[in-house]
Image (spheres, rainbow, N blue to C red):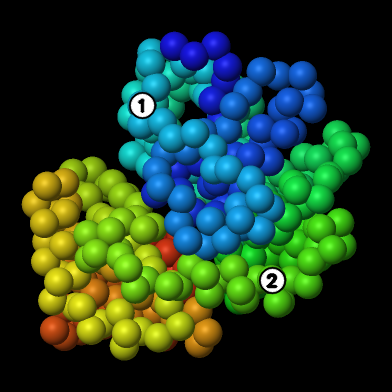
Amino acid sequence: MEEKTLIFGHKNPDTDSICSSLVMEKFDKNLGFDVEAVRLGDVNKETQYVLNYLGIEAPRLIDEVCEGQAVVLVDHNEFAQSVNGIEKAKIETVVDHHRIANFETAEPLYYRAEPVGCTSTILYKKFKEENMEIEKKEATLMLSAIVSDTLLFKSPTCTAEDKKACEELAKIASIDINTYGLDMLKAGTDLSDFTPEELINIDSKEFVSGDFKVQVAQVNTACIEDVLQNKVEIEKAMTDFMNQNGSNLFVLLITDILNSNSQAIVLGDIPVFEKAFNKTVENNMAFLEGVVSRKKQVAPVILNVL
Ligand code: MN
Ligand code: MN
């Protein structure tokens, strides 16, 4: 077991999971706690853009924790999305903006949940509440997380609080949100050197309802057609994943970040998907107009019909 409390976001970490872990580390260190931000998977290209911009390293990679390990969860709470061994860890704190599900602890904890668009928006408020000064580095990290999670304020998950926080942080970081934000999002849409197996794992989450396992993966792109050129190989990778993981349904959202739509590739229990979205799946595909948020527009819709 490690002496330090480990802080991490979900598996297949996105920009919010990595940036919020680093910001939470700074917050806790300011309060005198012995903590370390770590990560549960590879850093994606969008997040790498942020780390390069700041000239900093990614947190250390871990894949499991020992019994009794003290941990802080950011940007997630569901055990299926967390570190291996989480059931036996000592969860001290959670800071999150997702539904609370499949979550249980043996001991009391600090739990901060708000229905805002990004974990970093909550962290921004925590800094304010403690009258803690926000430095340029943390401002950039939080701003990046908010831009990522809200797709530059275009996602339906974006709230007025996210926008306000981001604008304040932009002043501290001396960043033009639109210029920096678009460059950052575009860096994340370069899918050219991903194998189909890697592509479906860039940002993939499992949701469980009873015995039913739904995998919902998402990739951002500026051109859906480009991604569909490899549809056959992608479907093969999805099928392999389902067989290995015992998933009942796999939905891959190919999200056009410029026009805010998603093309879904659907495999497995297709009738569940069709019922959820009231759409016919043709050739394993369905076009979801105006859908960009897995959290708000896809996962709950599917879980609802189960
Ligand atoms: Mn996330
Ligand atoms: Mn998030």
Say if 37 sits above or below 299 in the image.
above
Of residues 53 and 110, the one drawn nearer to the viewer in this rendering: 53
Q: Earlier in the sequence, mark 1 or mark 2?
A: 1
Which residue sits at x=54%, y=43%? 58
Within 10 Å of the Cα at label 1, are there few (<14), some (14-19), or many (20+) other Cα atoms? few
**Pointer 1 and pointer 2: residues touching (CB < 8 Å)?**
no
Q: Which residue is mark 2?
A: 180
Residue 249 percent coordinates (x, y): 19, 60
Instruction: From the top left corner, tell me how far across and down residue 206 is, in percent.
Output: 31, 50
- The amino acid at mark 2 is Tyr
Residue 107 can be seen in this image: no
SS for tag 1? loop
Q: In the structure shown, which secondary structural element does the residue marked by tag 2 occupy?
A: helix
Q: Which residue was labeled with disc 1?
A: 64
x 9%, y 52%: residue: 243
Position of 271 relative to 51 (above/below): below
Quadrant housing residue 6? top right
Foreground mark, 1 or 2, reads: 2
- Judge the density around disc 2: few (<14), some (14-19), many (≥20) Cα neighbours within 10 Å: some
Mark 1 belongs to which amino acid? Glu
Decide which of 176, 87 is in the foreground and name it: 176
Where residue 266 appears, x then y in whole percent? 21, 71
Location of residue 133 in the rendering, given as x and y in whole percent from the top left corner: 88, 41
Quarter in which the N terminus is drawn = top left
Q: Is residue 104 left or right of residue 212?
A: right
